Amino acid sequence: MTQLFQSNRSTLADCMPELVATARGDLKATLAVVNVKLVNVVSGEILPGMSIAIQGSRIAYVGKDISHALDENTIVIDAKGKYAAPGLLDGHCHIESTQLTVTEFAKAVLPLGTTGGFFDAHEISNVMGLKGLRFMLEEARTTPLAAYMQVASCVPSTHPGLETTGAFIGPEEVAEALSWGPDMIGLGEVMNFPGVVYGDDKMIREIQATLRAGKYADGHFTWKSDDWRLPVYAASGVSGDHECVTKEDVIERIRLGMYAKMRQGSAWHDVAETIKAHTESGIDTRRMMLVTDDRSSESLLREGHMNFVVRHAIAQGVKPVTAFQMATINTAERFGVARDIGSITPGSCADIILLDGNLADVDVVLTIASGQVVAENGVMTTTWEGYNIPKEAFETVHIGRQLVELDFQIVAPIADGGLIVKAIEVVENHVDTRERKVRVKVENHHVNLDSTDDLCKMGVFERHGLNGGHALGILKGLGLNIPAAIAMTVAHDSHNLTVIGNDDLLMAKAGNLAADMQGGVVMVTEDEITSFPLPIGGLMSPEPFETVALQSEAISHALIRAGCTLNNAFMTLSLLALVVIPEIRMSDKGLVRISADGIDIVPLFDAVV
């Protein structure tokens, strides 16, 4: 039987008198967890035979004997020697990448031991601006999660000439959003790192607004870790960065006083390499964090969330307590909220997980959030009042016309012969791409791709109803071996309609189907159509978690049937329009190259051969 969750995350100042009275024994605990092996992430110890007394939403007392704080009205949970650890925290996460609403995301991750996180809602912000951020914040406040939101720093991700986004957020909007409450924790990843380094007025003033509000700025720096400009970036006050893919990336950021975020998403697997900064180079872990960044709903269902990431870090040779620190206290300290979350200590919020068996297994069997049992044995035991997402969030795809076969014909500068073009090559399990020079045939002024070269076309169509522009390019490495096309409105970060395929007619069909259902993903072959509707901002589904996970999985299976064997191919493809990650991308404005010198639009064609 599920119970109604009572949202009661009181501040320490407000409930301190009751906590002290409970710790003395004058007031009795509302909930107690006894006989635990305490994972003390502050001291780095495992303490057997400990118990925890909770008053309301916070911890009042931790010790060997808490009998003085109990009476017949106290709900007592006998852990029978299980491990008790702080609820896991995701230090960098885009909820929209799960394709779930905040409510369904909470239902998915709470049974897995995630009790809070720091969420950068820059996907919905690129579509709807502050209105999108606001509704996600308000929905998050209805859930048991300790959810902290960041205002998107880069809407658009870089200067407008490189892409068309659905909104604009500047310094004034940043200041406004940060005034919404203490759960607006800071500025989301500053992807326009060249703008920061070279003094772009918009970026400098956004960071200034964040610092003046006493908040935190997150980073996104993809130049090499030994680049002289990393210290310049750090000088701006950007103090955490998740774009770490090598141990050197981690080491250099920590040496500059930054927090290094090591991610294990669905399609980017960076922990195995980045964790070597500790396991091989011996770097102190206090400024190392484990994060997910982007994790699909099917990954949540099949693998897990932060429990999976912590388990993976332990498998790389990290001591279990250290791995838990990287997903709890380190994360809380990075954002200045360690007084509230991240440890099982008196005064902290009662966000606690019980773990069975070996600690390294990270087998979560019970989750307490805000002093209430919310999940047990992998199942939610609480529910809460729903949140009504505004109607305008369901009306964000505005192509303005039906796509046709001609929209996908690439016009060449010669009538017949051969051309060298710049192709985008996908890299499995990584966010970066490679720029490849490939030869293509031209017939009657049109590029004609050879199916044996593992090449297909990629088109990006502006979908916010602003200018109707589009651009075409060449993609390598997808592996399609039959006529097929995939269309999606999930295309970080501007989320324009992106269509990829090897058949112009199927590409038009897939694009129209995705637009007609107000966003989502559609995979089309000559024999089947697989649809994944995402009508909320063209990014998220209103359906339950399990339904969304199965729909996402259906797209993955359809891609496999068409010959694509990339791990989490859909998520990899969704980043091909993100024009701030090396080496080369495609926006609605054209082919975009990201190099050590900056970010620029470059021509598709290289030479006649």
Image (cartoon, grey):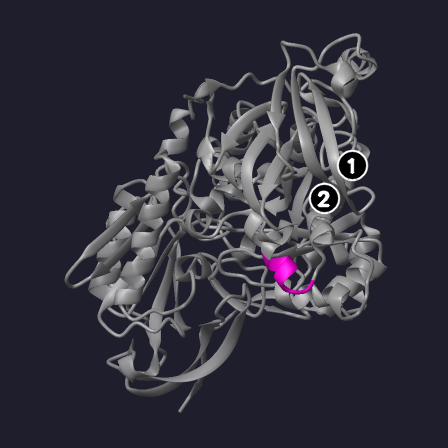
SS type, badge 1:
loop
Label whose residue precedes the other's in the sequence (2 or 1)? 2
Image marks 2 and 1: residues in contact by CB distance under 8 Å: no
Residue drawn at 24 percent across, 53 percent down: 530
Q: CA distance from mark 2 to mark 1?
A: 9 Å
Question: Is 344 a magenta residue?
Answer: no
Location of mark 1 (residue): 336
Vertical comparison of 349 with 470: above or below: above
Apparent side of residue 94 relative to residue 234 in the rendered image (left or right): left
Please identify, in this view, whether the residue under mark 2 or under mark 1 is nearer the observer: 2
Of all residues shown, which one is farthest toward the bottom?
Answer: 609
148, 11: nearer the viewer: 11
Q: Badge 2: how crowded within 10 Å, few (<14), some, or many (20+)? A: many
As shown in the figure, which amino acid type bears the numbered disc 1? Gly
Spot occupied by residue 341 in the image (x, y as percentages of width and height): 71, 33
Q: Residue 215's quadrant in the figure?
A: top right
Crowding near pointer 1: few (<14 within 10 Å), some, many (20+)? some
Picture disc at residue 353:
none
Q: Give the overall secondary structure of the magenta segment.
A: helix
96 lies above or below 226: above
Any part of residue 74 in sight:
yes
Q: What amino acid is at disc 2? A: Thr
Please report the bounds of the magenta region as a residue range: 312-317
Task: State whether residue 151 appears in this view.
Answer: no
At 63% from the left and 23% from the top, the residue drawn is 371
- Which residue does the numbered mark 2 point to in the structure image? 331
| In this rendering, position of residue 531 left or right of residue 136 | left
Which residue: 55% across, 52% down?
308
